[in-house]
Amino acid sequence: MKIILYQPLIPQNTGNIARTCCVTKTGLILVRPYGFSLSSRFLKRAGLDYWDDIKVEEIEDLEKFLQTSSYPFYFFSSKAKKLYTDIKYEQECFFIFGNETSGLPPYYFEKWPDKFVTIPMKKKERCLNLSNTVAIAIYEALRQQAIN
């Protein structure tokens, strides 16, 4: 599995996600541009000493990347209707998350509406913290794969 962060803005979230990816052997892909430098002390601090054990890929064009990949992919969004637990995740797939303030551009929902899933939460709330959402998604997939 690989986590894709679309133009992340908060270095601490990305650092926490990198740690989660490291301990779960999950890849991490960042879509440019970011709201911080990869040399940010906040990013490094949140990722602690896990940076040496994780390979972070960087891409410019998410759509092109997805169109040339053979792996299934899922967008996580608070606006989706399908529950994340209703999907059977394969070992090789991509989980895509929008940035902390604006999420994913509507274009992706228009192009791939059937690929959007959500994590349930209290109505009228905006969203969960990005790093928490990524952890929930990874561990659901790992739970399913342990059963299979």
Image (cartoon, rainbow, N blue to C red):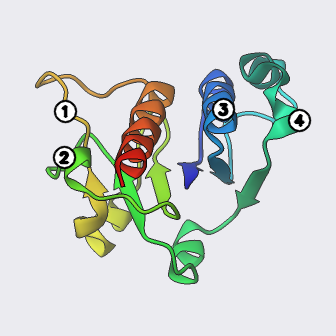
Indicate the secondary structure of the residue bearing disc 2: loop
Indicate the secondary structure of the residue bearing disc 1: loop
Q: Badge 3: few (under 14), some or many (20 or more) residues near its Cα, within 10 Å?
A: few
Q: Is residue 109 above or below residue 104?
A: below
Q: Which residue is mark 3?
A: 23
Q: Badge 4: few (under 14), some or many (20 or more) residues near its Cα, within 10 Å?
A: few
Q: Is residue 67 above or below residue 8?
A: below
Amino acid at dot 2: Leu
Q: Which residue is mark 4?
A: 52
**Left or right: where does residue 12 sit relative to residue 82?**
right
Indicate the secondary structure of the residue bearing disc 4: helix
Q: Badge 1: few (under 14), some or many (20 or more) residues near its Cα, within 10 Å?
A: some
C-alpha distance separating marks 4 and 1: 34 Å
Indicate the secondary structure of the residue bearing disc 3: helix
Q: Residue at x 50, y 40 (%)?
A: 99
Quarter where residue 53 is shown: top right
Q: Are marks 4 and 1 in contact (CB under 8 Å)?
A: no
Residue 97: image location, x then y, percent: 46, 47
Q: Which residue is mark 2?
A: 83
Quarter where residue 107 is shown: bottom left
Q: Residue at x 19, y 46 (%)?
A: 83
Residue 146: image location, x then y, percent: 42, 46
Q: Which residue is mark 1?
A: 120
Amino acid at dot 4: Asp
